[in-house]
Image (cartoon, helix red, strand yellow):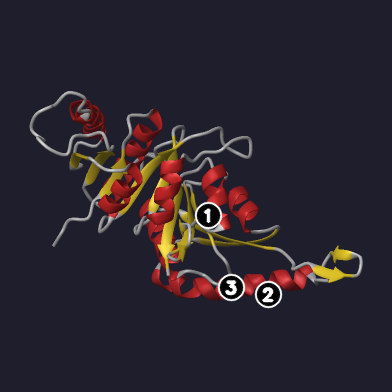
């Protein structure tokens, strides 16, 4: 049986090193080995045992070794492996992540709505990876599970189409962290049209909110039975899914969103909520693929 690793992509940037440290803490929680990977097309694909002119492999291996040593010092009981792959960064990361437990990448930016956090490689990988992919910004704290009080795990849900894989991942993450799970559903009344154009919808907001809350509770019931030790906060908000998740994410330990495994003529795409949360959240975000 193949061992499933937590895989962290490293590109030599401080943000990717922060992601590797976050991945190490996660691997320790999972009881899984950690694999540090650098992917770059200019790495020589031949003569792997010796450097050639212009070959970046020795420098990449040295950088990986430095990060690996830092992780081993912090987690002496953790198995840490390093590897380089000569490939397009997106293709290589997606390929290496198959059959692994989790993929962790760094993100960048200013945070909030003042700037964007995600680079083109991280965004493309999150849209294509077949395993849960976590994006971690450079300043994200790495929680110490032995001393730090647990925060919340926030999961964004559509009460009309909840994804079982997303819920299962979020509940398992909350249990491993000893954290509460906040299940967030943001909703908006559908607009009405008249001769004068779009008008505010004639909606009984309290009544509709009760309906949305009942749907959310119904979808959570099975997983609450499977994870009776996980405290659950059911959080229904008026204002749309993106704003609801981003507001709930402030101070959380992890945000979990889903991504449908469906193709577009432009390739694999993230949904609007996942795309916005990845760009604007300052909290680590896990993107979980689902049918």
Residue occupied by mark 1: 274
Residue 118: give x, y in percent of width and height: 49, 41
First reached walking from the N terminus: tag 1 or tag 2: 2
Image height of 113 relative to 155, above or below: above
Residue, x 25% and y 59% (percent of image)?
Answer: 99
Residue shown at 23%/30% (left/top)? 60
| Image coords of residue 169 (percent x, y) | 40, 61
Q: Quadrant of residue 204?
A: bottom right
Q: Which mark is residue 211?
A: 2
User: Of helix, strand and loop, which one carries label 2?
Assistant: helix
Q: Which of the 4 image quarters holds residue 24?
A: top left
Residue in the image at 71% along x and 69% along y? 209
Local packing at callout 1 (Cα closer than 10 Å; few below 14, some 14-19, many 20+) is: many
Report crowding for label 2: few under 14, some 14 to 19, many 20 or more residues within 10 A (C-alpha): few
Residue depth check, mark 3 versus mark 1: number of the one nearer the observer: 1
Q: CA distance from mark 3 to mark 1?
A: 16 Å
Q: Is residue 269 above or below residue 77?
A: below
Determine the CA span between mark 3 and mark 2: 11 Å
Q: Quadrant for the N terminus, please.
A: bottom left
């Amino acid at each position: 049986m193949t061992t499933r690793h937590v895989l962290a992509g490293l590109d030599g940037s401080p943000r990717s090193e922060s992601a590797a440290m976050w991945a190490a803490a996660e691997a320790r929680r999972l009881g899984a080995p950690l694999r540090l990977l650098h992917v770059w097309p200019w790495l020589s694909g031949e003569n792997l045992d010796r450097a050639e002119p212009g070959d970046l492999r020795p420098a990449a291996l040295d950088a990986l070794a430095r990060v690996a040593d830092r992780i081993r010092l912090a987690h002496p009981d953790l198995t840490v492996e390093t590897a380089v792959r000569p490939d397009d960064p997106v293709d290589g990361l997606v390929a290496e992540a198959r059959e692994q437990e989790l993929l962790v990448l760094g993100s960048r930016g200013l945070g909030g709505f003042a700037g964007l956090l995600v680079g083109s490689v991280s965004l493309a990988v999150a849209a294509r990876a077949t395993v849960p992919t976590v994006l971690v910004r450079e300043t994200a704290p790495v929680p110490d599970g032995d001393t730090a009080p647990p925060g919340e795990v926030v999961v964004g849900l559509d009460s009309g189409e909840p994804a079982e894989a997303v819920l299962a991942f979020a509940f398992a993450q909350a249990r491993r962290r000893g954290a509460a799970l906040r299940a967030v559903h943001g909703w908006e009344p559908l607009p009405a049209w008249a001769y004068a154009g779009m008008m505010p919808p004639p909606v009984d907001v309290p009544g509709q909110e009760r309906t949305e809350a009942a749907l959310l509770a119904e979808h959570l019931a099975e997983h609450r039975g499977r994870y009776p030790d996980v405290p659950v906060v059911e959080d229904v908000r008026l204002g749309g899914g993106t704003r609801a998740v981003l507001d709930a994410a402030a101070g959380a330990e992890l945000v979990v969103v889903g991504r449908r495994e469906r193709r577009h003529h432009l390739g694999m795409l993230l949904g609007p909520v996942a795309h916005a949360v990845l760009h604007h959240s300052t909290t680590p975000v896990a993107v979980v693929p689902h049918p």
